[in-house]
Image: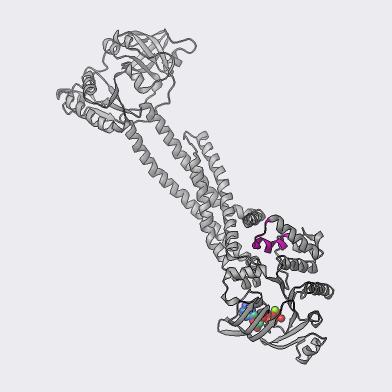
């Protein structure tokens, strides 16, 4: 019941000194708002990253043929390495026990034509397993099946970008497009995927939506190599059964491929999960840095509150004396003034949360940065303002509680 | 015995200067007495009253209030005594300016732990008794001096303390209003309250049954009133 009274007194005081209270709360408001905005930027980046790596597959290991210059290529061939090949795939499949699925893939930059339109696309030769590893979603039609692969059919699955450029109105399925000098029938269209705008490890950034998939057998049988000395495969994607075994499997795979390639450094191993972890670690440091800046702002806000509370206690010495004279205990005075500083900091905290929310919404609206506000960040920021209120309100409140009744009642 | 004071002394030390405001006061007051304290300015009346009201502590000597040695009590216990057993009334009213009359009267009840409804009811009753029911929602600055002092009395009586200490309660009032307030005290005394009041005016002291005169920190006279207070005062050339 006394709490209710304290809150009433505190709010009356706040309303009575609107400008002063607002100025006092500014530090907290900006502190809380910046904590929320910064955490939302961090969280947005994290979600983007997770999305990006999920596309690569969290259980996957990628072995990729390095992009080498003609000279380097000659050198490694001279040192007996044939680059990534189906033999590597076979060895990995036979030796590594943790494997769930494995899919070889060949790549080539190609010229694609349909009627009078043409564009540059990535031609990718894959086995039917590829779809199962990466869980591609189809917009229409279906992915390459085993039969089409076995029979080296001239079929292709196109990315959404290719589909929208070539087939604005009509249905692409069943249409034929010309890739290099070959005519292939479109059997499926992939759903649009988030753009791959950043380089991930050894994977150069590219627009996944302008990929065109063909059976690997067709690729090898019908299309010329980009370079004379180019390897048979550009990439091998391996899915392990249990993500716990991923580094063990990766180690083994590296040994096998390295042995096949006579220790030539012409391939690299990418583990999306580990890259994600690495990126998260870096982001955590960045978050701590930003968080500290916001915390300093909160600290300054807290000092502002302490300052105003000390002034308030001075100003209200007589009131304190009167309350003590009619029977208020020290604790009653203490809790009254802590309630007042809490009221300031919590009100500031609430305004700060609202400001922080609108800030992070504005950031994602007006810039390229993705933001995401979590309940957790709101709670953290709010909790901080409560802590600031209690911490910085304690000293002035203690001072008020320790005033001697008789002296304060005489105070002019 | 409600109040027993033995050889009470109070020294104020301000830098190098030492002021001895009370220099060995002995005083006994019984339940339901009506006592006035008079004396020249600076003689130590307020100092004594503040000690009686547990607002201040003596430098030496003994103060036994309601059979309890006050020097043995801690701050919380003293607060409780001020809240439950003593009603203090000041010359300057000491109402909280932002609170209404009713809220001012409720204040001691809040600290006594009454719930909202109980304290509202008690506070209204106390204001009614002071003839202020129509002023319950007024702020102190919307009330006359006499009304403010009545609110202060209502506040002092709210927790039914049984003893009222008033330090020049009529000092800021005109004589008509002062007499009304004194009539009120008289009534409260007849209802069983013990009243101790400080005054400068012999006519006011006449309302009490017993008149104490303090000079230079010592009680120099302690008699029942019988119309002779004015005489004593002039004998000691206290009135100026
Ligand atoms: N807080 C204090 N610090 C120092 N000296 C004080 C203090 N309070 C009172 N005194 C001194 O103690 C003496 C007694 O003061 P007190 O207020 O008790 O007098 P009083 O009888 O109430 O006077 P008045 O009739 O003017 O109210 C005075 O000399 C005064 O200066
Ligand atoms: Mg005085």
Examine the rendered structure and indicate whether residue B50 appears above or below residue A383. below
Is residue A90 something that shows in the picture?
A: yes
Residue A176 shown left or right of residue A405 in the figure: left
Which sits in the foreground, A232 or A180? A232
Which sits in the foreground, B106 or A10? B106
Which sits in the foreground, B194 or A180? B194
Residue B67 shown left or right of residue A376 in the figure: right
Give the image quadrant in which the ligand numbered 2 is located.
bottom right
Q: Residue at x 51, y 57 (%)?
A: A391
Examine the rendered structure and indicate whether residue B37 appears above or below residue A308. below
Quadrant of the rendered image containing residue A102: top left
Quarter that holds the C terminus of chain B: bottom right
Residue found at the far left of this picture: A79
Figure coloring = one colour
Residue A154 shown left or right of residue A373 in the figure: left
Q: Main secondary structure of the magenta part?
A: helix
Is residue B240 something that shows in the picture?
A: no
Examine the rendered structure and indicate whether residue B152 appears above or below residue A95. below
Q: Which residues are magenta?
A: B97-115
Q: Residue at x 51, y 43 (%)?
A: A378
Q: Residue at x 47, y 50 (%)?
A: A295
Which sits in the foreground, A275 or B108? B108
Quarter that holds the N terminus of chain B: bottom right
- Where residue B201 appears, as percent x and y from the top left, is 79, 81
- Where residue A369 appears, as percent x and y from the top left, is 46, 35
- Where residue B49 appears, as percent x and y from the top left, is 68, 78
Residue found at the far bottom of this picture: B235
Q: Is residue A291 magenta?
A: no
């Amino acid at each position: 019941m006394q709490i209710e009274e304290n809150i009433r007194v505190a709010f009356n005081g706040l309303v009575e000194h609107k400008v002063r209270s607002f100025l006092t709360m500014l530090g907290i408001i900006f502190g809380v708002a910046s904590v929320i905005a910064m955490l939302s930027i961090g969280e947005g980046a994290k979600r983007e990253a997770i999305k990006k790596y999920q596309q690569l597959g969290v259980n996957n290991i990628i072995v990729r043929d390095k992009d080498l210059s003609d000279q380097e290529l000659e050198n490694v061939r001279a040192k007996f390495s044939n680059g990534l090949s189906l033999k590597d795939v076979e060895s990995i499949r036979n030796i590594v026990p943790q494997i769930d699925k494995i899919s070889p893939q060949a790549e080539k930059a190609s010229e694609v034509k349909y009627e009078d339109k043409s564009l540059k696309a990535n031609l990718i030769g894959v086995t039917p397993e590829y779809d199962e590893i990466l869980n591609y979603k189809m917009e229409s039609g279906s992915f390459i099946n085993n039969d089409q692969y076995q029979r080296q059919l001239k079929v292709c699955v196109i990315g959404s970008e290719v589909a929208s450029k070539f087939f604005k109105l009509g249905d692409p399925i069943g249409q034929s497009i010309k890739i290099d000098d070959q005519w292939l029938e479109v059997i499926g269209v992939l759903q649009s995927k988030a753009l791959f705008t950043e380089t991930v490890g050894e994977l150069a950034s590219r627009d996944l939506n302008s990929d065109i998939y063909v059976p690997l057998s067709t690729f090898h049988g019908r299309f010329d190599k980009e370079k004379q000395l180019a390897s048979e495969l550009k990439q091998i994607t391996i899915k392990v059964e249990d993500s716990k075994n991923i580094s063990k499997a990766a180690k083994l795979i590296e040994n096998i491929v390295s042995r096949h390639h006579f220790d030539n450094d012409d391939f690299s191993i990418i583990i999306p999960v580990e890259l994600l972890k690495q990126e998260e670690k870096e982001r955590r440091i960045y978050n701590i840095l930003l968080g500290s800046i916001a915390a300093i702002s909160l600290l300054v806000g807290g000092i502002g509150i302490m300052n105003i509370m000390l002034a308030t206690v001075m100003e209200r010495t007589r009131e304190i004396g009167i309350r003590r004279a009619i029977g208020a205990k020290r604790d009653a005075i203490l809790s009254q003034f802590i309630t007042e500083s809490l009221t300031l900091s919590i009100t500031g905290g609430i305004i700060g949360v609202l400001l922080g929310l609108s800030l992070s919404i504005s950031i994602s609206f007006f810039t390229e940065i993705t933001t995401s506000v979590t309940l957790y960040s709101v709670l953290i920021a709010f909790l901080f303002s409560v802590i600031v209120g209690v911490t910085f309100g304690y000293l002035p409140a203690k001072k008020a509680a320790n005033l001697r009744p008789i002296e304060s009642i005489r105070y002019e | 015995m409600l109040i027993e004071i033995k050889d009470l002394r109070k020294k104020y030390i301000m830098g190098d200067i030492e002021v001895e405001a009370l220099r060995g006061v002995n005083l006994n007051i019984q339940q339901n007495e009506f006592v006035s304290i008079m004396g020249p300015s600076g003689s130590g009346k307020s100092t004594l009253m503040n000690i009686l009201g547990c607002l201040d502590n003596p430098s030496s000597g003994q103060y036994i209030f309601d059979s309890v040695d006050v020097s043995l009590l801690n701050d919380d216990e003293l607060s409780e005594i001020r809240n439950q057993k003593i009603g203090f009334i000041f010359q300057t009213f000491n109402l909280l300016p932002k609170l209404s009359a009713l809220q001012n009267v409720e204040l001691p009840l809040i600290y006594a732990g009454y719930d909202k409804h109980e304290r509202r009811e008690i506070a209204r009753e106390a204001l009614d008794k002071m003839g202020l029911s129509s002023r319950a929602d007024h702020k102190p600055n919307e009330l006359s001096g006499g009304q403010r002092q009545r609110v202060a009395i209502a506040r002092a009586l709210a927790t039914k303390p049984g003893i009222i200490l008033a330090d020049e309660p009529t000092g800021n009032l005109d004589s008509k209003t002062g007499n009304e307030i004194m009539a009120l005290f008289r009534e409260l005394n007849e209802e069983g309250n013990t009243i101790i009041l400080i005054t400068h005016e012999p006519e006011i002291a006449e309302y009490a049954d017993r008149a104490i005169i303090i000079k230079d920190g010592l009680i120099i006279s302690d008699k029942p009133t019988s119309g002779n207070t004015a005489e004593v005062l002039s004998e000691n050339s206290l009135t100026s």
